[in-house]
């Protein structure tokens, strides 16, 4: 799947994760901050998603570890 093709899939996945609560927090792990910025801008152009946090694997691990 090409990266551009994955954005609609991401949007549907976030929608499923949020269920009936469109502002429910959802974390999406992205490879780098640059990828996160690109995803955020593209999702914004395509209608966006509220309550979505884009984090790198290192930042997610730090959050899980309580740092």
Image (cartoon, grey):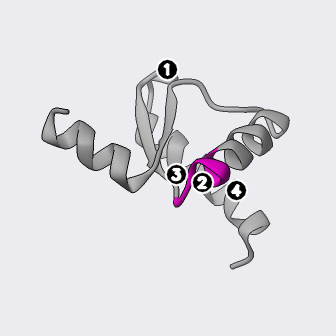
Which residue is pictured at 70% across the width and 56% down the height?
Answer: 7
Residue identified by numbered label 4: 7
Q: Nearer the viewer, mark 4 or mark 3?
A: 4
Dot 2: element: helix
Q: Are marks 1 and 4 in contact (CB under 8 Å)?
A: no
In the rendered view of the protein, which quadrant contains the N terminus? Answer: bottom right
Label 1 to label 4, Cα distance in Å? 19 Å
Residue identified by numbered label 1: 23
Q: Are marks 1 and 2 in contact (CB under 8 Å)?
A: no
Dominant secondary structure (helix, strand or loop) of the stretch shown in magenta: helix
Magenta part of the protein: which range? 31-36
Tell me which label, 1 or 4, sits earlier in the chain: 4
The crowd level at tag 2 (other Cα within 10 Å; few <14, some 14-19, many 20+) is some
The crowd level at tag 3 (other Cα within 10 Å; few <14, some 14-19, many 20+) is some
Dot 1: element: loop
Label 1 to label 2, Cα distance in Å? 16 Å
Q: Are marks 1 and 3 in contact (CB under 8 Å)?
A: no
Q: Is residue 42 left or right of residue 14?
A: right
Estimate the x, y position of residue 56 in percent, counting from the top left.
Answer: 45, 50
Is 25 above or below relative to 63?
above
Which residue is pictured at 25% across the width and 42% down the height?
Answer: 62
In the rendered view of the protein, which quadrant contains the C terminus? Answer: top left
Residue identified by numbered label 3: 13
Dot 3: element: helix
Tell me which label, 1 or 3, sits earlier in the chain: 3
Label 1 to label 3, Cα distance in Å? 14 Å
Q: Are marks 3 and 2 in contact (CB under 8 Å)?
A: yes
Label 2 to label 4, Cα distance in Å? 5 Å
Estimate the x, y position of residue 51 in percent, counting from the top left.
Answer: 51, 25
Residue identified by numbered label 2: 10
Residue 56 in magenta? no
Which one is in front, 18 or 53?
53
């Amino acid at each position: 799947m090409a990266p551009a093709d994955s954005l609609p899939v991401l949007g549907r996945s976030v929608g499923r994760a949020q269920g009936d609560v469109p502002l429910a927090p959802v974390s999406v792990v992205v490879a780098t901050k640059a990828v996160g910025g690109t995803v955020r801008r593209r999702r914004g152009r395509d209608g966006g998603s509220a309550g979505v946090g884009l984090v790198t694997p290192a930042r997610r691990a730090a959050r899980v570890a309580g740092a």
